Image (spheres, rainbow, N blue to C red):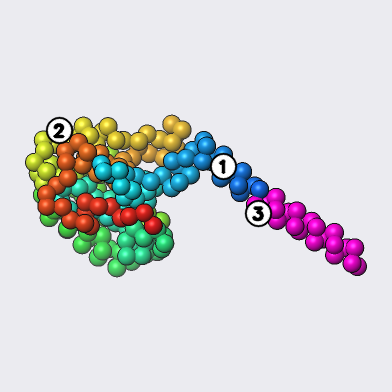
Amino acid sequence: MVSTLLVALRASVVTLVLTGVLYPLAVTGVAQVLFPHEANGSLAKDGQGREVGSELIGQGFTQPGYFQPRPSAAGAGWDASASGGSNLGPTSQKLRERAMAEADRLRRENPDAPGPVPVELVSTTGSGLDPHVSPEAALWQVPRVARARGVEPARLEALVRSRVEGRTFGVLGEPRVNVLMLNLAMDRQFGVPVPPTAQAVEPRPRP
């Protein structure tokens, strides 16, 4: 019995060291060497070199001079510690009312936008953290952002198109625009709108 227990104990210790210590250290080391940006959270920096968020996690922008993401049901909104959707079904009256209210707001804030409000701008994602919108949803917001910044719409359209990410591996997903990275690129090219607000100008700090 004692010998059996000793064998089991040795096997447990060896397994623990291999899978709980050596393997994680090896994987972490390889990731830091080959993919340091991704391994450290894909952190995004503003023009002053400050870490203002992650490229992988959406965050809210309310100032007129910034492109807005899809709405979020994660916590109080874009909360990485409470990822999730609203779980409201297509027959939900609450979902309908929320979407209609969001559409009304967007129409008021974007009176010069072409065509109807893009559906994705009134619907949340399953995670509530999606940092992307479609190129069409970003371009729809150009008139508002251009007016708020005093920039020619054509210049903003060119910036949006330059930030379009293609399908992953050429076949997965759809073309998309990372809202945080687009707004940071816009600040670098056209300057920060005045007066700034902490909520809109400074994306959420690194957790």
Circle 1 residue: 29
Mark sitting earlier along the chain (1/2): 1
Residue 20, image quadrant: bottom right
**Residue at left offset 24%, top offset 36%:** 160
- Bounds of the magenta segment: 1-21
Please tell me which of labels 3 and 2 falls first in the chain: 3
Q: Are marks 1 and 3 in contact (CB under 8 Å)?
A: no
Along the line of sight, the residue nearer the viewer: 161 or 48: 48
Amino acid type of the residue that numbered disc 3 sits on in the rendered structure: Gly
Residue 6 seen anywhere in this rendered image of the structure: yes
Q: CA distance from mark 3 to mark 2?
A: 54 Å
Q: Position of residue 180 (x, y in %)?
A: 29, 46
Residue depicted at x 23% and y 57%: 199
Relative vertical location of residue 144 with respect to residue 170 in this rendering, above or below:
below
Quarter-wise, where is residue 207 in the image?
A: bottom left
Q: Secondary structure at mark 3?
A: helix
Residue 112 in the image: state x and y as whole percent.
10, 45
The residue at the point 70 percent across, 56 percent down is 16
| 111 displayed left or right of 173 | left
| Residue name at image x 24 percent, y 50 percent | 68
Residue 154's tag is: 2
**Would you say residue 26 sits in the magenta stretch?**
no
Q: Nearer the viewer, mark 3 or mark 2?
A: 3
Identify residue type, mark 1: Gly
